[in-house]
Amino acid sequence: MIKEAIYHRPKHNFAYAYDKETIHIRLRTKRHDVEEVTLIHGDPYVWKEDAWQYDRAPMTKSGSDDLFDYWFVAIKPPYRRLRYSFLLTDNQEQTVYTEKGFYDHVPADDTAYHFCFPFLNEVDVFTPPQWVKETVWYQIFPERFANGDPSLNPEGILPWGSAEPQPDNFFGGDFQGVIDHLDHLTSLGINGLYFTPIFKAYSNHKYDTIDYMEIDPQFGDKETFKKLVQECHKRGIKVMLDAVFNHSGYYFEPFQDVLEKGTDSKYFSWFHMWDQEVKTTPQPNYDTFAFVPEMPKLNTEHPEVKQYLLDVAKYWIEEFDIDGWRLDVANEVDHAFWRDFRRTVKSVKPEVYILGEIWHDSMPWLQGDQFDAVMNYPFTNAVLKFFNGEIPLEAFRNEIMHVEHMYPENVNEVSFNLLDSHDTKRILTYTEENKEAVKLMYLFQLSYGGSPCIYYGDEIGMTGGDDPGCRKCMVWEEDEQDHDLFSFVQGLIERRKTEPAFDNGGRMTFLDDDDLLIYEKKSDNQTLRFVVNTTDCDHSVRLNDKIERVVYQDQKSNVGDQELQVAAEGFVIIEI
Ligand code: ARE
């Protein structure tokens, strides 16, 4: 047994409260090394004749990545306290892995040997809003979705879609445009809208806020925004806004005051100024987002700044009834701020979704006291690379399993799983316009757990490279939209809503196969099997299970009694 590879640490993603009575325990061992794992567990205070009384529970392998196997068991300790160790068996030995090391027997004379989950306090349970589990998001970059009110057009705007997007050009998208096109969104089937920033700002992307309490006049006024939220709510669509709290814009009044008055400004300590004399060129002498002088970093440790931003967070919930905040550059803001942020917004509306923009491992923010989820870019990368033929099947399965085991299950259920965004290439461009590959990406994304998001226009086949290329004007001419792609995505969303095991209702496992991506999703009363062929030749698979029903398939594949013939770049979904 390779003991150096064995790892467990209470709390985080290895031992966590799933709900108010269940503790999930995970263990990591070297891949293909250990044959069996049993959890030795008991209440720390139950003793008989100087011996600790414990039970045994078999652990199952919940998945493997390229280096490790992961083992899992759920325990409901009667008194909500748990001491535990692991009994591991391979073909040569049996050993007990405790907090104090490895033993050849279960040390029962002192519970101090064992791992400790001291008490399952309900208030510490990670509890995201339940509606997020049933949400399919649609991301809108407001300047580019639809121009519904030409009277708001900023000066010098270009005719809709007449030019490639540039960092500084404008086309006049606005809220009325979104209201006018809500039918497109309900017909697609989405039920959450995420808007990149809408507050008064200088640029077309609005990440350089001038006033956090005002709507940017090019998008409309507060009345129109209120109407937009109400119209969305009427249709069962939630609304999430972008909170850019890491930095302000250059024209934010407090920053202008600092530029004007220097150390005499009462806002001097609202920012991270390096010197008494402020310089913006050639390099700013204050902290910024990246090296962008127009985006001075806000000092969120300053009580006034904190209070101001928390008031902003409350205001848009209280007055406009929004349902979520996406937090820009969330990992560069201090944790203490986010803890207060959570307390504040949840006290106004407990069901608000707090989504951090973090591209990396985010466990420190996902322990129930800060965010409900992060933008799951590790998922994005695995999907893009596999369906675009850059990594082999096994590497994909490993990466997805790795991502799944990075976080607790209750975190995964609300994870924001995107394929692209306003910061990346569009999927159709990523795949060099291989629409079939894009369809299979959607199939995987929309049959996976979490809370998937579609970037505006992808569903009708829009293309675009990295920022700013991915920010083209939405195409509304029917004859230029890809209706086949739209119906495909629509069909998947529909099945996500109607088939119990398609979404978070089903637990996913990969099945071994050298050529085809095969995975099952199991809920209490449904088992779905997904057979996906990403190769460019047809493949058949024999079936040992009886098919209850064909749930969905592409037109070229064939389903026989004993065999599935899956066409190149095709798929079959069956219920067994
Ligand atoms: C503009 C230009 C860019 C240029 C950039 C820097 O358009 O071509 O590279 O300036 O000078 C907003 C606008 C952007 C604008 C930017 C600066 O939308 O168009 O770019 O402001 O003016 C990291 C951060 C992550 C951040 C990305 C962009 O961790 O938080 O970089 N994303 C948010 C928003 C952006 C927004 C801002 C931040 C600023 O979503 O839209 O930009 O408010 C790796 C790293 C990540 C890195 C990621 C992307 O994977 O691990 O940490 O994210 O790549 O670069």
Image (cartoon, rainbow, N blue to C red):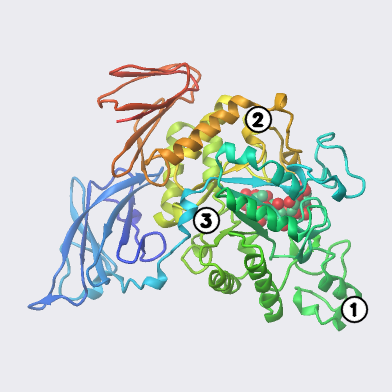
Q: How far apart are marks 3 and 2 (CA)?
A: 31 Å
- Of the image marks 3 and 2, the number of the one nearer the N terminus: 3
Residue assigned mark 2: 461
Query: Observer-nearest residue: 128 or 356?
Result: 128
Dividing the picture into quadrants, the one containing residue 525 is: top left
Q: Which amino acid does label 2 sit on?
A: Gly
Residue beneath the point at 7% across and 78% down: 49
Residue 575 marker: none
Asked whether, in this view, residue 68 is left or right of residue 300, the answer is left
Q: Which amino acid does label 3 sit on?
A: Asp
Residue assigned mark 1: 261
Residue beneath the point at 45% across and 32% down: 393
Residue beneath the point at 74% across and 44% down: 177
Q: Residue 550: image x %, image y %? A: 37, 25
Image quarter of the C terminus: top left
Q: Residues within 10 Å of mark 2 (few under 14, many from 20)?
A: many
Q: Is mark 3 within 8 Å of ligand 1?
A: no
Q: Which amino acid does label 1 sit on?
A: Lys
Q: Which residue is at the far left? A: 49
- Of the image marks 2 and 1, the number of the one nearer the N terminus: 1
Q: In this view, does 380 lie above or below 241?
A: above
Q: Residue 454: image x %, image y %? A: 59, 41
Query: CB of mark 2 within 8 Å of CB of mark 1?
Result: no
Asked whether, in this view, residue 291 is left or right of residue 541, the answer is right
SS assignment at label 1: helix
Q: Residue 81: image x %, image y %? A: 27, 72
Residue assigned mark 3: 361
Q: How crowded is mark 1: few (under 14 residues within 10 Å), some or many (20 or more)?
A: some
